[in-house]
Amino acid sequence: MLTPSEIKKESYAQKIIRSEKIVKILSKKYKNPSTALTYSNPLQLLISIILSAQCTDERVNLVTPKLFKLFNSIEDFANANKRELEQIIYSTGYYRNKAKNIIACCQSLKLNFNNIIPSTMEELISLPGVGRKTANCLLTEYFNKTEGIVVDTHVLRISNRLGFTKNIYAVKTEIDLMNLIKKKYWRFYGSDLILFGRELCKARSPNCKMCLVSNLCPSRNI
DNA sequence: CTCCCGATAT
DNA sequence: ATATCAGGAG
């Protein structure tokens, strides 16, 4: 078994092999990864993902039942009263930005996309409040397509810990990961690392003793 | 790069 | 008290 300092000196070819080993181990552990957000149509999923910025899925699921009861369609959100929307989503944080983005996003869906949520990265990120992370979530979770890798706070943190990138920005990290990891693993890499980050490789206290891939990690602390 | 932001865990 | 949570815009 390589020591952390030995892993840090690996070649790029060795890094590719190590990353594939890690993906395979984690995808075996997390069989059918899917979002913890509750939704019943693509619009609800899109709104939920926007609300989930810097907020737990659990918290989002506490506000969406009321939200989706009052707002049923793209039209409803496009015409929403900003104050009313802010009050409903208040507890998810960033509520002013989120309310503004949700309204602008649905106005764009109405104006530019005939009230149909688009299914390509290019179209999705043209929507206000939708960046690559939100688009990647929607593409993998709902459209069953792979155009990139979901890089949220967990994927960003763990990718750095594993030595797959030295970037502190999600968009740049996604590029590093797309170069390193085979496309067929992109979907699993994103969703598995999120589950892995929540339960084991936590931001404050990574549980290296219980970790399945600690022997492949340059940041392990045992 | 900074700003936006409440709820929760530590 | 402070770090963290399925980020995006300016």
Image (cartoon, coloured by chain):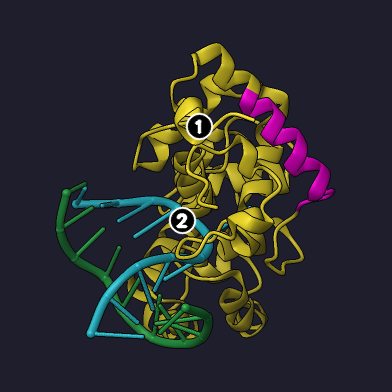
Chain colours: A yellow, B green, C cyan
Q: Residue at x 34, y 42 (%)?
A: A168
x and y percent of residue A80 in the render? 47, 75
How far is disc 1 from disc 2 in space, using C-alphas?
Answer: 14 Å
x and y percent of residue A221 in the render? 50, 51
Which is in the foreground here, disc 1 or disc 2? 1
Q: Which mark is residue A137?
A: none
Predominant secondary structure in magenta? Answer: helix
Question: Pointer 2 indicates a residue of which chain?
Answer: A
Query: Badge 1: few (under 14), some or many (20 or more) residues near its Cα, within 10 Å?
Result: few
Count numbered badges in the picture. 2
- Residue named by callout 1: A122
Q: Earlier along the polypeptide chain: callout 1 or callout 2?
A: 2
Hey, what amino acid is under mark 1? Glu
Provide the residue span drawn in magenta: A18-33
Q: Is residue A34 above or below residue A98?
A: above
* Membership of A218 in magenta stretch: no
Pick whichever, A109 or A48, lies toward us: A48
Pick whichever, A80 or B4, lies toward us: B4
- Residue named by callout 2: A105
x and y percent of residue A193 in the render? 62, 48
Q: Is residue A206 above or below residue A94?
A: above
Q: Residue at x 68, y 57 (%)?
A: A210
Q: Residue at x 80, y 49 (%)?
A: A29
